[in-house]
């Protein structure tokens, strides 16, 4: 989605880095000689002595959780709780880089600005952002921390609710968040006969589905579970689309040519090999396993 919108509760992930070439969802590119201890000593940081992590606001489940304390600037969830998949991953990465929890600071960065050209207010951004070669021309991506399935959410009892294939979606009005891989999936893969609707934020797309201004909402699968259980009454996940090996995946986003990216890949490799990423997916994204596949 995120990639964009809503994109919601399952074992996932898909993203990568590079200047134009695509990283494998499971490939680590950090040189073997580079250790995370060496990385942690002289990193060029946005704020000296702290790791600054960006994400969007509101911060939705299942990516973030724990609610917001009184007076918090964050909506829905404060990312500093450590709850939710992306918050937990961010703190696991920070620990691997040598930053204790108290040395992690969060900043609000709108989704599209995270991968736009220019100076960044973060050391890395975590916001369900899928790797694409176009994005990788102006920012760097980490290796995958989640391999992604796109999914479509519909209202029960509507004509689209009986569709059981990707081809069957073509006559309907679909929607997604602006700039996400969900929207690109609609235009490039589904190719509906009606022009898809696009929204600056996922909440606008959710509202449109609630009001039946669109027939279906395309988001990542974990977000889809959140939409159906919390945001859109009487809705269901019509189905998920097949994931491709080495295909779409979420990655952490860095300023172009950031030396922190290679250090982070080393940490992610360890989190993958020691089972931490799988454990966190099971903890926060496990509901995604039941959605049917649309072929």
Image: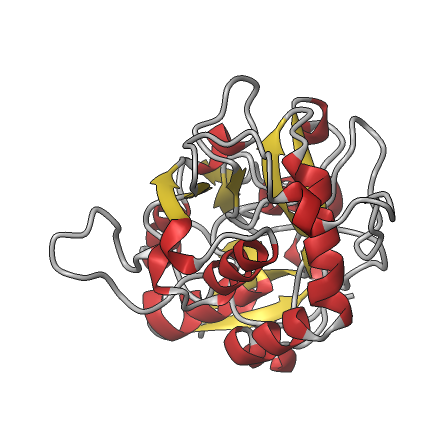
Residue depicted at 72% across the width and 49% down the height: 265
Residue 92 vertical placement versus 192 (above, below): below
Name the quarter where the C terminus is drawn. Answer: bottom right
Q: Position of residue 245 (x, y in %)?
A: 85, 59
Q: Quadrant of residue 276?
A: bottom right
Q: Position of residue 148 (x, y in %)?
A: 68, 58
Q: Is residue 266 left or right of residue 87?
A: right
Identity of the residue furthest to the top in this view: 118
Residue depicted at 74% across the width and 51% down the height: 266
Identity of the residue furthest to the left in this view: 70
Foreground residue among 185 and 270: 270
Residue depicted at 72% across the width and 23% down the height: 137
Q: Is residue 169 left or right of residue 60?
A: right
Observer able to see residue 192? no
Q: Is residue 42 left or right of residue 158?
A: right
Foreground residue among 7 and 104: 104
Residue 123 vertical placement versus 176 (above, below): above
Residue depicted at 53% across the width and 53% down the height: 94
Foreground residue among 207 and 89: 89
Q: Position of residue 6 (x, y in %)?
A: 48, 55
Q: Position of residue 67 (x, y in %)?
A: 27, 66
Observer able to see residue 102? yes
């Amino acid at each position: 989605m995120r990639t964009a919108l809503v994109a919601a509760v399952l074992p996932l992930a898909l993203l990568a880095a590079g200047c134009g070439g695509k990283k494998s969802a499971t490939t680590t590119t950090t040189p073997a000689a580079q250790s995370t201890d060496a990385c942690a000593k002289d990193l060029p940081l946005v704020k000296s002595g702290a790791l600054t992590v960006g994400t969007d606001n509101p911060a939705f489940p299942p990516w973030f959780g724990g609610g917001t304390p009184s007076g918090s600037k964050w909506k829905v969830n404060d990312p500093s709780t450590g709850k939710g998949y992306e918050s937990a991953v961010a703190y696991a990465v920070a620990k691997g880089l040598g930053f204790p929890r108290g040395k992690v600071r969060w900043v609000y960065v709108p989704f599209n600005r995270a991968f736009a050209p220019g100076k960044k207010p973060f050391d890395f951004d975590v916001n369900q952002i899928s790797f694409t070669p176009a994005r990788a021309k102006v920012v760097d991506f980490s290796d995958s921390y989640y391999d992604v399935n796109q999914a479509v959410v519909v209202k029960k009892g509507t004509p689209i609710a009986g569709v059981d294939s990707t081809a069957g979606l073509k006559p309907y009005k679909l929607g997604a968040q602006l700039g996400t891989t969900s929207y690109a999936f609609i235009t490039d893969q589904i190719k509906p006969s009606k022009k898809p609707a696009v929204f600056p934020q996922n909440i606008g797309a959710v509202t449109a589905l609630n009001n039946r201004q669109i027939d279906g909402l395309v988001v990542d699968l974990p977000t889809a579970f959140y939409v159906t259980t919390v945001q859109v009454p009487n809705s269901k996940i019509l189905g998920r689309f097949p994931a491709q090996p080495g295909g779409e995946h979420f990655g952490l986003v860095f300023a172009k040519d950031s030396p922190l990216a290679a250090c982070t890949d080393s940490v992610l490799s360890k989190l993958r090999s020691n089972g931490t990423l799988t454990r966190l997916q099971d903890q926060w994204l496990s509901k995604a396993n039941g959605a049917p596949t649309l072929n």
